Amino acid sequence: MSRMNSFQTPQPAGQRSITAMRLKPEGPYETADVPRLFVPSNHRMAQFIDFVEQQEEETRRTLSIKQGYSEIQLLAHLLRNHLSGKMTTSSSLAGNSGLTYGTAIRAIEDIIKRGLIVKRPRTATGKSFSLHPTHKLLTEWQELARRTRSLIDTTIGFENDQNAAPTNYYFGSSYATGETLAPPGVLDTRLVISGSLRILVHADPTFMAMNVLRKQFESEFGVSIKSRALSIDRLRDEILNNAKRKTSDYDLIACDLPWFGELAQKGALLSLDSMMDPNSRDIRDIHPVAMASARYQGRQYGLPVQTTPELLVYRRDIFADAGINPPDTIEQTLAAAKSLHDPFSGLSGMAWNAGRGTPLGHSFLFVMAAFGQAVINLRHVGAGFDGENVSGEEFRPMFNSDAALQTAAYFKELLQYSARGILTMSWFERAQCFADGKCAMAYCATLLSPLFETESSSPAYGNTGYLPHPHGPAGSPIAPIGGYAVAIPSNIAPERINSIWTALTSITSAPAIKLYIENGSLVSPRFSVSMDPEVKAISPLISIVDEMARFETLQMWPRPPVPEITEIIAIAGEEIHDMLSGAKSIKQALENSQNRADTLMRANGHY
């Protein structure tokens, strides 16, 4: 198989039912190359363009009014092509304008002068051009769509409907708390790179949505895009292997947030500090904890593309029927799991990551944090710990702490009320178990919430509540942050860097993040996207996570991005799995974890 495989194409993104997350997102995307089906990137906008165009045609046919030439059909064709990633030229636009050719060409030139169309060279000679809507044009149509919907609601749509939602429209203004983001525009000039833009990403819903939008990004950048999607462990291996090559095989790589310490220390990533302004409005729009997770020793190495905390999800209907309150503490969580666990009726108390190695290791670090202790001896800062600035004794493992002992004991007891096959369960399986109605609660990354948040066939659809991790006696509610940031390999050809930086800022921008959400993702690292009224309408989860970010419930210190974190996670996942399977006692598992992690830190000269 070629090193640069295509993504596997998911179902059409206009269907909010994701068909089991477009296959399991921890591997199956890696294999088959299949024909890609492209659909409009913003379905609401595409439908609105059709509405405006058809409404004008019906008005012309029906009303006896004086006719003059209209730009509507011309602009509608341009916008429709932009949303579908299709090229538009002056000739093709004129031919689809409904005007005579000469009139259409004059109209196009006039629109260009008014700053509504970008005329971009297609070749180095500059003799041929493609036409694209400017940001101004896209924003105007986005605002027209909002006003039109609101006017219809207030005049002919819902004026007599007592159950209708209140409008946000009033004399041309809006009471909405967030700004509606327009679709991304195009670059004034195409990316100056030889060949294709080459991207290495994780096989998850956000990057699958990016693949659905590939045609639009190719139109935006003016170059083709080649992408390769891998599961989490294979992705890390490929990033490390790529760093050993003389010249990188990829222009952009998606990195799991806790990898940044290791990858930066090994020199695999290019620092972004010289290219970005940390005080810019665009950078300040990103969740601070997500930005911090992609830094190492004060230097920025990636821009976040998704913020996906691990939360406790629970079935509101099941809890209500049983008369049980949602749990705030570990003790309450165990009591609820015990009370609701009924394997004979097909319902378990809890689903969680208990698969050996990486899955269980993550669970241990996150729950240990909910008991009030980081996995290494981080310095206390406020109500938490400093996971970004680590030195000396702060690298010492904490598997010999009371919090580690309490975590191990909690897992041992929770095992009794857990889903069938729990000791092989990882990210996708636990989310699928909850989506299938086989458990009352689950620890779940919001990345996989579309399995039940947008899948109407799931028993959990419309019945799911979201909570931070329940805490132990010395802990507090916490939502350990996960997700991915996009970085530039350090061994990239120097002449490509400026164009790649432009591509990086584009695919992580607020309009791009909104498109991912509209095409199957439910995670955002940006405040502006979470406040967008159209985004908020898709799922309440987006606002819930945004609120956690604002009130600092989201934290990165439970899984600090130190260079050894991947190995520490693996150690915990192996030793605790032996404990859960009965091969070791709690004491033996924690002592082994402490000794192995301590040996690792000493070998790396931390203390």
Image (cartoon, rainbow, N blue to C red):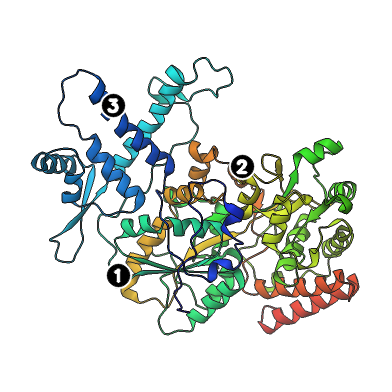
- Identify the amino acid type marked 1: Ile
User: What residue does disc 1 label?
Assistant: 193
For image coordinates 31% across by 72% down, the residue present is 195
Considering only order in the chain, which callout, 2 or 1, is on the residue closer to the N terminus? Answer: 1
Residue 572: mark in rendering: none
Considering only order in the chain, which callout, 3 or 1, is on the residue closer to the N terminus? Answer: 3
User: What residue does disc 3 label?
Assistant: 58
Above or below residue 241? Residue 164 is above
Labels 1 and 3 touching (C-beta < 8 A): no
- Identify the amino acid type marked 3: Glu
SS under mark 2: helix
For image coordinates 51% across by 70% down, the residue present is 32
Labels 1 and 2 touching (C-beta < 8 A): no
Residue nearer the viewer, 439 or 583: 439
Residue 547: mark in rendering: 2
Q: Is residue 57 left or right of residue 128?
A: right
Q: Is residue 394 left or right of residue 37?
A: right
Which class describes the residues within 10 Å of circle 3: few (<14), some (14-19), or many (20+)? Answer: few
Residue located farthest toward the front when viewing the structure as drawn? 61
For image coordinates 81% across by 44% down, the residue present is 327
User: How far apart are labels 1 and 2 at the CA level?
Assistant: 40 Å
